[in-house]
Structure formats: structure tokens, C-alpha cells
Image (cartoon, rainbow, N blue to C red):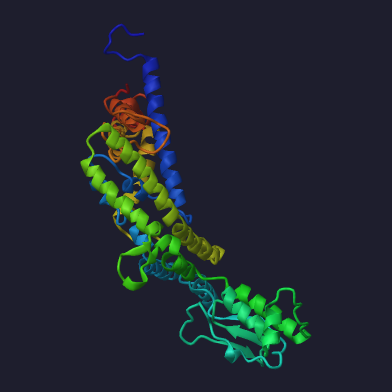
Amino acid sequence: MPRNVRQISFLACLLLVVLRVSIGWQFLYEGLWKLNTQKTARPWTAEGYLANARGPFRDKFRSLVDDPDGLKKLDFDTMVARWDDWKNRFIGHYPTLSDEQKQELDRLLDGPKEFTQALATLPKGVDLKKFKPRKYKAPDGWYLRYNPKAKRLETNLHLVPEEREALLKLVEPQPTTDDERAAAADPRTPKPELDDAAKKFQQAINRLSDRSGKLGLKDRLQVLLKEDPDRNGVVLAAQEGTTDYSRPGKKQVFENLLGRYELNLKAARQTFQQEHLAKQWSEIMQKKGELLGPIDALTTELRENAYKLLTVEQTALGPVPETPNQVTQINQITMWALTILGVTLMAGFLSRLSALGAAGLLLLFYLPMPPWPGVPEAPGPEHSLFVNKNLIEVFACLALASLPTGRWIGLDAFIRRFVFFRKTD
């Protein structure tokens, strides 16, 4: 142990090198893990961390995100445009896609154009022209027909239960007198026996209904964002097109909570107000998860199923690159900075400069959610005041930047000895 406090013992040098290598390993592993996720349907992104920023720099970090509150994901046209853009980039990224692969991609998004079910013959007396869609909003040029040449039923409708029941009744004897109607309405009255052709017709209708119930991703998105009253609320019948709701949905509750939170955040001064804000933000995140979770799941489903269409040769081209924006640039800088700094710290190459760069990167991780008085606590089990793990690592990296640990054990020592022919430390 040296008597001069300005001297560093061998053990202290060794432990400082171990500290440098440990931080480098953490950086390298984090960087490689984040880079590897870019090849999956759920690539890592800093968007969530930036969108949940809090404290005095909240607005600055949130401004780096195009849609920090996820409100654009709740717009049907915006999401359809994003999916179509990704599909076009997918086709452009894999130029060897076959026509069959492209058609399957279209079916994945838009659903089948037509649903068919084999049927040997149409029962006598059944006229499909008498069938009219009920609650379902039929598309232009809708049809439900029997193709005698192909011997099958054909339709471009997504049959709902009410429509299926109406079709099943086409082969059932219809009461004509009051007594017959009364008997038919009595649940104790046994149903008339159907002939073989009628039974096969009903079986075909049931199977056709099951097949047509499989919606494409866009249809499922439309149900979520346009037709689900629990999510979207019920507009007053007399004031359609306004923002007055007889029954607000989850979307309106979420938007109201966001607006109230922003107002309370600006006025918060006391500790109890901050505690209320933390509770309110937790509720907002829960509502956000309920609203955006199913939509994100549909986006993930689109990408996963699209990648499953690829051959081994096509997969070798890698995933579809994301559209460049501020967040994607931040993602790339973060992932590569972690990886490169991890390598240089572990190798002891430019160790002081690498440690200084690591301290700067960690400081950027610290500032979006600083554990300062008056700032809502970051989510998680940890509780900090001023100092958290990120800030501790900042100081550790600054300490490493003040010492030539790479000239003790590392590439810096090798370069100094064999390139510059100077004595190593």
C-alpha cells in the first residue's frame, strides 16, 4: 500500500480496470441486444422513454417524438396510411417477391376479396336474390350467389349472425296462416324435418359464415377505431359530427385525462400535488395501454405474418428499414454509441475519451427522468433523490476519464509501447 496518497496501489489500479471493463460490458450487451431486436417484428425504440419524460426537460425530450401520447394511432386513416406505406416499402425491399406472395400480403391487410363454400346444388325454391344484408353495411357491388358451374356459394360479404339466420330460414317452411304463425312462435312446437338438400344448404351457409367472419387487419382496425362504442363513445343522435357524447368511450376518457394532467402539471407546486400527478399519470398509462395495445398488436401481427411469407434467400436481405425520422436517428445513435463505447471501454482503447463519451451518454439517459424534488417518480421499484443508477455511472465514468486505465491494462498500453515506443505505466 503506498504511503503517498497521490500514488495508486496495484489493487486500486486493478479494480479501476475491472470497473471500466464492467461498464464496457454493460454498454456492449445493451447495444447488441437493441441492435438484434431490429431484425424482429418488435424492434427496440427510445420512443417510449422519450414520450414518458418528466421534469424540467420534459417538453424538450417529448418534442423529439412525433406522437408522444399515441393519439395518431387512434386515427383510422393515419394507421391505414402507415400500414400501406410499410407494405410498399416491404415490396420494394424484397424485389424477388412472387405474385402469390404479394397477393397473400394484400389478403393479410384487406382480407379475402371473396368467400366461397362448396354446395352440390341449390335447394328448390331458394332464391338468394330475396336475401338483403341487414345491420352489416354492405360494400358497393355486394353479392351472394350460387355458381352452378363451380357448384359453390360465393359472396363478398362478412356475414353477421343475423344475416346467417336469415339465410338458414330460406329453406325452412314459412307459416302462411295465423295458426301456423302462432305454432311457429311456440318454443314447444317441434321444427319441421328438412330434406337432405336443405340440410346441406344450411351446413354450407354455416361454413360460409365462419369463413367470412375472418376479417383482414384493416377491417379489424376499423372495428376497433370506428365501430366499437366502448372505445369510441356514442355520439348524440341529434348532433352527429360534433364532440358531444351521450356516452363517452375510453378514447374520450383518455383525452380528457391527458388535458387535465397537462393543466395540473403546470400548476403543481406542493408535494401532495406531485403525488396526485404521479397517480394520475399511472392511470393515463393504464388507459393508454388499453387503447394502443390492440392496435400495436395488429401492427406486430402484420409484420410477423409478412416476414413469414419470405423465402430463406429473401430473409437474408434483412428487415425492412424504418422510415427516417428523429426517433429512428436517436435509436441508431444510441444503439451504435452503446456498442462502440462498450468495445472501446473493454479493450482499453482511447480509454479516457471513451469514458468521457460514456458519461455524456449516461447523462442523456438521466435527464429525461431526473429524481429531483417536484418531479414525479419514474416507474419501477426504485426510489431515488437526486442520485440514481445512471448518475452513479456518470460519476464512475468521469473518474475513469481522469485516469489512464487503458495505459495500465488495455490497447492504449500496447499502442504506447509498440507504436510510440514509450515506456508504459
Name the spot of residue 212 as percent of width and height, x first.
Answer: 58, 75
Q: Is residue 172 visible?
A: no
For the point 65% across and 86% down, the residue is 170
Up the image or down, 234 lies above or below 395; here it is below
Q: Quadrant of the N terminus?
A: top left
Query: Which residue is situated farthest in the top direction here?
Result: 3
Q: Quadrant of residue 408?
A: top left
Q: Quadrant of residue 405?
A: top left
Up the image or down, 227 lies above or below 13; here it is below
Up the image or down, 225 lies above or below 414; here it is below
Camera-side residue of 119 and 245: 245
Q: Is residue 64 visible?
A: yes
For the point 50% across and 77% down, the residue is 136
Name the spot of residue 305 as percent of width and height, x first.
Answer: 53, 64
For the point 75% across and 86% down, the residue is 197
Q: Quadrant of residue 386?
A: top left
Side of 255 relative to 120 (left or right): left
Q: What is the tally of numbered marks visible in this picture? A: 0
Side of 303 relative to 59 (left or right): right
Q: Quadrant of the C terminus?
A: top left
Side of 386 relative to 122 (left or right): left
For the point 34% across and 39% down, the residue is 278
Name the spot of residue 159 as percent of width and height, x first.
Answer: 57, 77
Name the spot of residue 200 as percent of width and height, x first.
Answer: 73, 82
